[in-house]
Image (spheres, grey):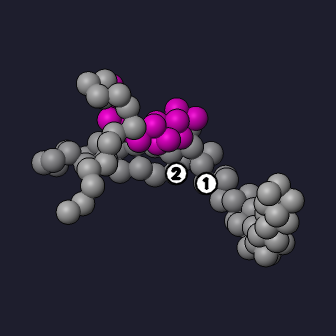
Amino acid sequence: MTAKRQPPWPRGSAPAVSADPRGVTLERDGLISRTVLPASPPGVEYAPTPLGRSLQAPIETLTRWAARNHGTIRRARKDFDRASD
């Protein structure tokens, strides 16, 4: 038997927008474009805009930094948690 997941909003007050709020924000900020596909059921296609594509290099740089420093960050967290106990 699996437990029922409760929605993250109070009973009877479902959100007015069914789209992922992060997607709406990215679309609003001009980072992605959204196209509704005429299908049954309707589909949605997202694509990066030129502004969104301009984030690729900085995100790749941040990803490489995070990979290089992952061990150091984990050790810092362990040290912090030990000192906080």
Residue drawn at (75%, 62%) of the image: 62
Q: Answer whether residue 39 is visible to the viewer in this image.
A: yes
Find disc 1 in the rendering and name its residue.
Answer: 53
Camera-nearest residue between 73 and 5: 5
Q: Residue furthest left?
A: 40
Residue shown at the point (71%, 66%) measured from the top left? 63
Return the residue nearer the eye: 79 or 46: 79
- Mark 2 neighbour class, 10 Å CA radius: few under 14, some 14 to 19, many 20 or more: some
Residue position marked by numbered label 2 in the rendering: 48
Q: Amino acid at mark 1?
A: Arg
User: Magenta region: which residues?
Assistant: 15-29
User: Dot 2: what SS?
Assistant: strand
Q: Is residue 58 left or right of residue 3?
A: right
Residue 69 appears anywhere in the view: no
Q: Are marks 2 and 1 in contact (CB under 8 Å)?
A: yes
The quarter of the rendered structure image containing the N terminus is: bottom left
10 Å crowding of disc 1: few (<14), some (14-19), many (20+): few
